[in-house]
Image (cartoon, helix red, strand yellow):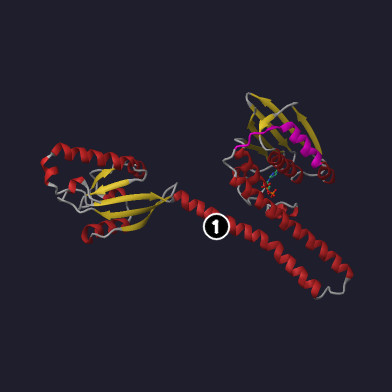
Amino acid sequence: MEWPWNRKDPELAAAPEQKSAMVDAVDHLVNALPDPILILDSSGIVIKANANAEEMLEMMPVGLHLSQAIRAPAVLEAVTRAVSQGSSASVDYEVRGPLPRNFEVYVSPIMPAQPDSPAVLLVLKDLTREQQIERMRSDFVANASHELRTPLASLSGFIETLQGAARNDETAREKFLNLMRSQAERMKRLIDDLLSLSRIEMNVHLHPSAKVDLAQVARHVCDLLSSMAQEEKVTLQINLDSKLDVAGEWDELVQVVVNLVENAIKYSEPGKTVRVEGEASAGFVTLSVIDQGRGIAEEHIPRLTERFYRISVQESRSRGGTGLGLAIVKHILNRHRGRLLVTSKLGHGSQFTIRLPSI
Ligand code: ADP
């Protein structure tokens, strides 16, 4: 890139006002660029920094040596090479601290006209978010594979036993087939939840517009889950305003309420009550699922909607959980411009409230 400062153009040299207009234009251009930009002279002094660079470095670096703004030997070496050998390079730069950030710094020489004119351009590309997403993606793949491999390993074990030791044992065969069925069902639940999550994620920016009465959704879900509640000896109580209209997709809202009521039943003891309460006020519809279970310690609450996050993996699995239910709830609510609020008191129970704009 040729900078106006470096032009040996006799016409420009003869027209200082034109030259200063060019310098202004380049100044504006550097300020308008979305990445942090620094320009150094050949001795490594910062002679230009755009607002993004000042914000990122949390200082005004102009007039300082680069080493006072960026304490990274690899970046400083790349600058030295740019000046002495005219070579460009991309180097990693990690900002440590309470909120660590990762950058890729592109260092490129600019042929200087005079000793104090621009000699090196630094473009800092913030990779923090990209790397976070990449880490989340690979964690997710690792978790999902692990979750699927566990029941698959049990299935293989049972098949081996049925082909070997239990080949002619009628009673053992029956027992193992039942165990195999429950492992296969677990894999099916997991795959169904994974597919649900990916379908909802694909549509997250499409806001549903059909009119859905959340009171009707809640009543329908309580009907669906009444036999589960009976089996677990949990009483389901409903207390709803007559109309709780929201813009939504029936099936997805049913899925949200099923996940919340199912959890409330699953994590309650026999003899307890689960209340489903809904009301419309001040432009919003709220639906709360309130249980008298053991409650959730405060430190877990912000993480409950992470995929595969469970307070006790063993307990969740023994109750047929996949660890994806609340992640699905969160994604569906995002699509509906809604929110999930969780409050809980250890030993007393939890309240999961969804809040959606009413129509
Ligand atoms: P799971 O399939 O394990 O139930 P969820 O995503 O639905 O997965 O919930 C995540 C975790 O949150 C559960 O494993 C459980 O530890 C906790 N949890 C959810 N709902 C409740 C509740 N009503 N009471 C106590 N703990 C709950």
**Residue 215 position in % (x across, y down):** 74, 31
Residue 273 in sight in this render: no
Q: Which residue lies furthest to the front in this view?
A: 11
Residue 62 in sight in this render: yes
Q: Residue furthest right?
A: 170
**Residue 163 position in % (x across, y down):** 80, 74
| Residue 250 against residue 358 in the figure, above or below | below
Q: What stretch is highlighted in magenta?
A: 207-225
**Residue 190 position in % (x across, y down):** 69, 54
* Disc 1 target residue: 138
| Residue 4 against residue 175 in the figure, above or below | above
- Which residue is at 43% across, 49% downward? 100
* Residue 320 is covered by the magenta coloring: no
Q: How crowded is mark 1: few (under 14 residues within 10 Å), some or many (20 or more)?
A: few
- Which residue is at 77% across, 68% downward? 158
Q: Is the CB–ligand 1 distance for label 1 below 8 Å?
A: no
Q: In the displayed structure, does residue 228 sit left or right of residue 61?
A: right
In the rendered image, the quadrant that contains the C terminus is top right
Q: Which residue lies furthest to the bottom in this view?
A: 164
Q: In the displayed structure, does residue 24 sit left or right of residue 163?
A: left
Instruction: Name the foreground residue: 183 vs 25.
Output: 25
Q: In the displayed structure, does residue 88 sit left or right of residue 236?
A: left
- Which residue is at 28% across, 49% downward? 68
Amino acid type, label 1: Ser
Q: How many marks?
A: 1
**Residue 3 position in % (x across, y down):** 22, 47
Dividing the picture into quadrants, the one containing residue 90 is: bottom left
Instruction: Name the foreground residue: 358 vs 296.
Output: 358
Dividing the picture into quadrants, the one containing residue 51 is: top left
* Residue 224 is covered by the magenta coloring: yes
Secondary element type, mark 1: helix
